[in-house]
Amino acid sequence: MIGFSKPYLDNKLTEKFKERASRDDLPPFMHNDINSILNPKKLHPSVETVIVVGLSYASSQNNNTRGFISSYTRGRDYHKVMAEMIKKGLKYLKDIYKDIKYSYYIDNGPVLEKVLAQQAGLGWIGKNTLLINENFGSYIFLGEIFINKKLVYDEKSKNKCGDCTKCTDNCPTDSLHTPYYLDYRTCRSNLTQNKGFLKKEEEMMIGNCIWGCDECQINCPYNNNIPRDLHPAFEAKIGGNIAEILNYNRKGFPPSWTSSALSWRGMRIIQRNALIVLGNLGLKDEKYKKLIVKKMDDRSKIIRYYAYQTYLRLGFNLEQIKGKIDQEKEIDIDNIIKRK
């Protein structure tokens, strides 16, 4: 999909963003240059048109493993795929306009990409805060090209969510309690990406998710009967096999994972989540027990902590790991026992 937007933002489409910014309620990963976010010409004074590109990553391959991994990360890193396509498009534009000036963004920089996408006619921002296209659903990656040439702008897409509340009703952590507002503090997808130690209630919120959460998309009617597997690059290569994940190490991280969009957080976060998921699902199995015990020797304090905690949550015999407990100097095992 491709559309053309004017280089300034519709006030109605930015109302909620402005409200959140005014009460300091923006996610920590949001770019802090609010002025440039709301005024594309502040970022690029010469911009006359924003070309918005959308790629469907809808897949027919289900995540049938016990640990869930979000669809957007199961294929090749979309940043790289989109960049390659945008560069091809730019080569074409350079042949037409010899004096063209441009810059492009793919989920980075001070850009409200979903607002620009709606202005470019690619879809509307739904109650789940995702861009929804009537024909391709919400499994869409976005990229933006800012150019100094005025092209014909597309008509802004109209919101077609209507009275439907399936995304808000099915959010597992009630993070969509207010339509068109996502509470990042409790969003399951966000929690799986947080670094360090999680609070006990946050661990419970993760459920079976090792990375991300697609519930609001899975339940969206606009994702029924849409074309899938349109781009081979996004074919699912990784899955949430907990045993395999706990067996990986930094040097043994397989190529399919290092080429994915989740590799930026590293294996430590993935394995931490896998251990939490084991406890949440109550998977008291001897094969998992061996892996958990092995992780008690991990060089990461965080992994060792969650290995002990998961071992205790699953009700394995504490006496069998007494030697490891006696050797552990950094972790308060007594506190883990109380917390489990």
Image (spheres, helix red, strand yellow):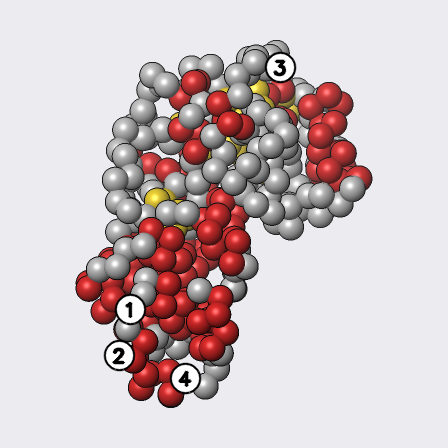
- For label 3, the residue is 156
Placement of 34 over or under 133, stated as above or below:
below
* Residue 124: x %, y % from top left: 57, 20
Query: What SS does tag 2 mark?
Result: helix
Q: Residue at x 38, y 53 (%)?
A: 280
Between 72 and 42, the one lying in front of the other is 72
Placement of 37 over or under 116, stated as above or below:
below
C-alpha span from label 1 to label 4: 18 Å
Classify the position of the C terminus by image quarter. Answer: bottom left
Between 149 and 336, the one lying in front of the other is 336
Q: Residue at x 33, y 51 (%)?
A: 281
- Which comes sooner in the sequence, label 3 or label 2? 3
Query: In the orientation shown, which residue stands out farthest toward the right?
Result: 22
Query: What SS does tag 4 mark?
Result: loop
* Residue 292: x %, y % from top left: 30, 68
- For label 2, the residue is 320
Query: What SS does tag 1 mark?
Result: loop
- For label 4, the residue is 328
Q: Residue at x 63, y 30 (%)?
A: 178
C-alpha span from label 3 to label 2: 64 Å
Q: Is residue 244 visible?
A: yes
Amino acid identity at mark 4: Glu
